[in-house]
Image: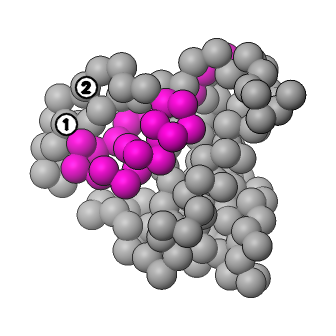
Amino acid sequence: MIRVIDMQPEHVNEVLEIERSSFPLPWDRDTFLFEILINKLAEYVVAVQDEKIVGYGGMWIVADEGHVTNIAVHPDHRLRGVGRAILAELIRRARSKGLTRMILEVRPSNAVARHLYRSLGFVEKGVRKRYYQDNDEDAIIMSLENLQVVSDEER
């Protein structure tokens, strides 16, 4: 069973392992500590399975919008619902804070993530040219609108 809880400083070592295995330009320890301890606009969570951190995600709350900053799952736990659990929790938290929409950027080459986002209601809204610094790949902007509309699942 996957539990999604607030990210704490003691989780950062495991989060860094996942970060380094997921991104060509990984965030460092200080960045994660800033996000969870200092940045009042940030909301970060970890997915826990069998007492091990298997994924994490975060968002910034800007006005009435949640901007998903990152989601990553340990390579040994991908395609098992961990990313879905993390994103669903971020959506739940955004709704509970009264946010009206969420946005994120995703690489066109990341078909698995794009499928996950679409399955949870995100739609493609535009492109940020040469967004990713490691290879100048564009980013697809995806948005989930009308967060405060109650879904059929929640009725």
Reading the image, the residue beneath label 2 is 127
Tally the marks.
2
Q: Quick check: 101 left or right of 8?
A: left
Three-letter amino acid code of the residue under disc 2 = Val
Q: Quadrant of the N terminus?
A: bottom right
Give residue 53's position: percent from left, percent from top.
65, 75
- Residue 138's label in the rendered image is 1
Work out which residue is located at the far right of the displayed protein and give it.
155
Q: CA distance from mark 2 to mark 1?
A: 7 Å
For this rendering, which residue is in front, 16 or 30?
16
Q: Quick check: 69 left or right of 110?
A: right
Placement of 81 over or under 58, stated as above or below: below
Q: At 13% across and 51% down in the image, what residue appears?
A: 135
Placement of 8 over or under 49, stated as above or below: above
Q: Secondary structure at mark 2?
A: strand
Res 32 → quadrant: bottom right
Three-letter amino acid code of the residue under disc 1 = Asp
Placement of 10 over or under 123, stated as above or below: below
Q: Which residues are magenta?
A: 100-122
